[in-house]
Amino acid sequence: MTRPVRGPQSGSRPRRLASNGTRIMVFGTFDIVHPGHESLFKQARSLAEHPYLIVSVGRDEVVERIKGFPPRNNEEIRRAVLALHPLVDEAIVGDRNGYLEHIKTAEPDIIALGYDQKGYYVDTLERDLATAGLKASVVRLSAHKPEQYKTSKLQNGTISI
């Protein structure tokens, strides 16, 4: 199946043709892009010979609901920073309610979860994907120095690439 390459209207800057690679999707807040996130991106990309990495950025209100406090940077700033990252092929924002609609739109072959991602949606993800007719496989990635590179532990409030 040929999948369209997202153009400027989606706010991404695709560098590779999506139809020529394995579409891999990761999720997160990405308030401060740090080496732990870079490890996540590298691990996700290593899952396929020709990876196309889609990063889903959590909506501001969803982040606040899950974490109990708002992100330091708004969703559009976080998405724009990730869209420029050399390991990211496409950066999108997640759904306001639920999570399946933007996954359906992105059509990932693989969903790669971070070591610390948990909660209801993670517990039901594989079942929900199957119910929606999506064939994406779900994998769990490893931690990279979580004692050092967890955003909540970092003192610096600026985003870096």
Image (tube, rainbow, N blue to C red):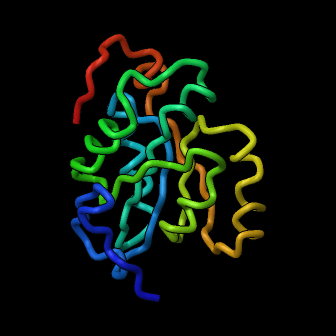
Q: How many labels, in total?
A: 0
142 above or below 54? above
Outermost residue on the bottom side: it is 1
Quarter occupied by residue 118: top right
Which residue is pictured at 34% across the width and 81% down the height? 20
Q: Nearer the viewer, residue 144 or 103?
A: 103
User: Whole-percent x and y of residue 32?
Assistant: 34, 28
In the rendered image, the quadrant that contains the C terminus is: top left
Location of residue 11 (image quadrant) = bottom left
Residue 156 x, y percent position in the rendering: 30, 14
Residue at x-position 38% and y-position 60%? 53
Above/below status of 62 relative to 71? below
**5 relative position to 84: left or right:** right
Question: Which residue is depicted at the point 59% across and 24% down?
Answer: 67
- Residue 137 position (above or below residue 11): below
- Residue that sits furthest to the top in the current view: 155
Asked if residue 18 lies left or right of residue 134, the reply is left
Image coordinates of residue 154 in percent, x first then y, are 38, 16
